[in-house]
Structure formats: C-alpha cells, structure tokens
Amino acid sequence: TVGKWGSGEVGKGCRAGIAIAMSLLIATPGAAQARRFCAADNAGLTLPTGFCAMIVADSVGRARHIAALPNGDLAVALEGNDGGVLVLRDADGDGVMEARRKFGPRGGTGIALGGGYLYFGLDNTILRWRWSDGMFEPAGAPETLVTGLMSRRQHAAKNIVLGNDGSLYVNIGAPANACQERDRTPGSPGRDPCTLLDSAGGIWRFETGRTGQSQADGHRFATGLRNVVSLGKDPATGALYGVHHGRDDLGRLWPQLFNDQQNAEKPAEELFRFEDGGNYGWPYCFYDPELRQKVLNPEYGGDGHIVGRCAQFRQPLMAFPAHYAPNATAFYRATQFPAVYRGGLFIAFHGSWNRAPLPQEGYNVVFVPMANGVPSGDWTVFADGFRGDRSGQAQHRPCGLAVAPDGSLYVSDDRAGRIYRISYVGR
C-alpha cells in the first residue's frame, strides 16, 4: 500500500499522529538523564511534546552521513577537499562533543561501523580502518576495499550500509536526470535501453572478506534507482530500505505536457524495501502522486498518463512530496522514545531547490510508523525548524541520521556543519 500525502494531509498525522500524541503522555526510563541534554530553545527545532534537542557540535564542516559508535562517540563523514572522517567525543560528560579527531585522505559521504572496521565511502573508493570500541583514531593506514566505482560530478556520493549478512552495500547514483541522449535538454529522447544502468543507477553488493576489489567484482543487487542517498537497513531484519530521489525538470523539458505547478509537485520521492534483483523503474518511469501509480517518462513516449512498461516495475511502499531530497533513513530499535516510535523509520529530507513557483520545502526529519516491514500509518513531521528564516537560503539542511546507544537520535547538517541530538524527556 502506498502511503497518502497531499495538501490536506501533510503533517496531520491521522491515526499514527493520534497514537504518537497519546504515547507521549507516558514517560520512558532514562528521561531524567536525557533531560540534562536539552537546550532552552531546543536548538531552534520544533519537536513533538516530550522531546528536546541540543547542539552537540557546531561548524564541523560539510557533515554528511554519521555513525553512532558503541562507546558514545560519533563518526562523521565530511565532504569536500578538506573533508575526511571526523570522530567526536564528549570528554567531560556535559553533552557537548568538544573533542575531535579527523583523518582520511579526502572528503566523502558514506560511513559505517561493523566487523572490527570503520568504513568510509569516497566518491570512487571504499576505505576501511581496523577499529575497536573506545578508539578515537585509527592506529594505521586504511585498507582499500573497493576502488574504481563509477564517479561523475552528478550524484557521485557513495553512501554505504553494512548488511547483517556481512556484505557491504553501496549506492551508485546515476549521473543523469532521465538518461536522455543529451542530459537535461528540452525534447531530447531517452536512451533505450539506458546503458548507464550497467554501472550506476542502483545498489551494488561487495564482499568484506577481501580487499582490492573493483566495481566489476561486485554484484548489482538492485537497479532502476536514480540515486538512493538515504540507503539504510532495519537492524532487526537486515532488510535494506531507502527513499529514491525522483527526477527533475518535467515542466522545463516537456512544457507541452507539464505546467509549472505539476513540475513542482511531480514526481514523488519513493520509499522502497530493496530486494535482490529488484528493478524500480528509473529512468523509464516516475511515480505520479496524483494518479498514485508509476507512469511512463516523456523521454520514453509518456504523456503523463500512459503506464506502459511501468506496470512491471516495483511500486513504492510510500510516497513523499516532490523534490524534498531524502538523504538518510534510520530505523528506531532503541527504547528511549515512546513505544509508538519503536520499529519505525526516521527519514531526513535535505530540502528542495526546484519547487518554484511553490515555496521550497522539506528541510525536516519525518517519521513513518512500520509494522511487518511496511508502513502502518501516514508519515508525520518529527523535527522541523532547520531551515530557519524562509526569506533566504536554508540555514541548516538535515543530511545524516544515527541512533545513539542511549536511544537519542543524532541529526547532521551539511549546510553549517551542525550536529543535533534529539532526546525524549517526558512531559
């Protein structure tokens, strides 16, 4: 079942929202401890009743994905020429992570911990350092697990997930909007078949038992995905999930078929559970939130209504507003938050740049209740206020998510380099 959204439903919460509101009346263990880490203004965020926030680190650089370490430290992937891996530590117990160590040859976006290693995803390479609990920096040089990954300027970031099976899963974004013969050119037809899918536009699986692999050594686990920066997993089951970045420019490239309003509201961002061998439809199709189905892209003969070959591709579990830019997912399997959140999914939306003439939106963290691996209610906005004053550029843009050992939720911001911690303290 595809979750609903629309102008009359966004943020209402419906049944899920009522359940959340009721659950907040019950305090959870550890509330007194969490209350010590609350800013008077909740760090500028708007949160559900009973939750609070504080800034644990600021101005750290372009903070992309993050990983909570078992000893309470936080590993941050910093993007850019002066980036690398940054480890943050609260050395004096005041809630602020004032101690910092940075290492790595250059910037990247993916970060993961498991099997005695800390993994780092650069644009074309996956590195790893031997890592044990309590370490603040590596003792030696990194190993190269995979090199030679498809890397072009558009969608070059490599976010990574360590599967419960011990494999490493890598999102390899497609360096294109809709695989046109001339990218982002009005009227240009799509390549059919889209040969980019041979080396990008999907999720690849690599072994962690050997180093020095190339992309050809990997297994293309899932395909038909323009860019899944938000790739994550349910730690309880190992199932992979993510929200697909939909295409852009329907109205600009095909004005005879889509007006400005439709360009702003289509296509939806799509939540999937990824399965081995699954094909999710890009670049041939997009999910239309108004029609509630996949339809054929105009580059491949679509007119905004034709379904055609799109009937054969996997449908989303839930749809979100267009161009919100989903950048991270995190399942909540801790116990600090009220019971209604447990087993549910948090999604960080980086925010839009292309919803004109409508206001730019997103810049928030939303919550999706889950049961038996699928959404059990509508999504609701969990944390808002990152954007700040709407008159200019967003002050902060959510990017990474991680659940701390104590059950708090960390959120990274790659606009101003801020790290937030959100905790539940009860009423």
Image (cartoon, rainbow, N blue to C red):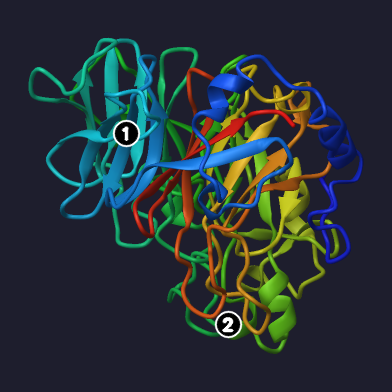
Q: Residues within 10 Å of mark 1 (few under 14, many from 20)?
A: many
Q: Is residue 264 left or right of residue 55?
A: right
Question: What is the secondary structure assignment of the residue under circle 1?
Answer: loop
Q: Which x, y percent locates residue 49?
A: 74, 40
Nearest-to-viewer mark from 2 and 1: 1
Whichever of callouts 2 and 1 sits on the residue coming sooner in the sequence is 1
In-front residue for pair 166/192: 166
State how many labels appear: 2
Residue plotted at (38% across, 49% down): 418
Dots 2 and 1: beta carbons under 8 Å?
no
Q: List x then y, in percent, for residue 141.
A: 8, 24
Q: x, y (%) of residue 140?
A: 8, 19
Numbered mark located on residue 97 in the image:
1
- Tell me the quarter of the picture where residue 18 sits: top right
Three-letter code, disc 2: Leu
* Quarter of the image that includes the N terminus: top right
Residue 296, percent from left and from top: 71, 64
Give residue 356's mark.
Answer: none
Q: Tell whether 23 sits left or right of 297.
A: right
**Which mark, residue 253?**
2
Amino acid carrying label 1: it is Met
> Which residue lies most toward the left here?
140
Q: Quadrant of residue 27?
A: top right
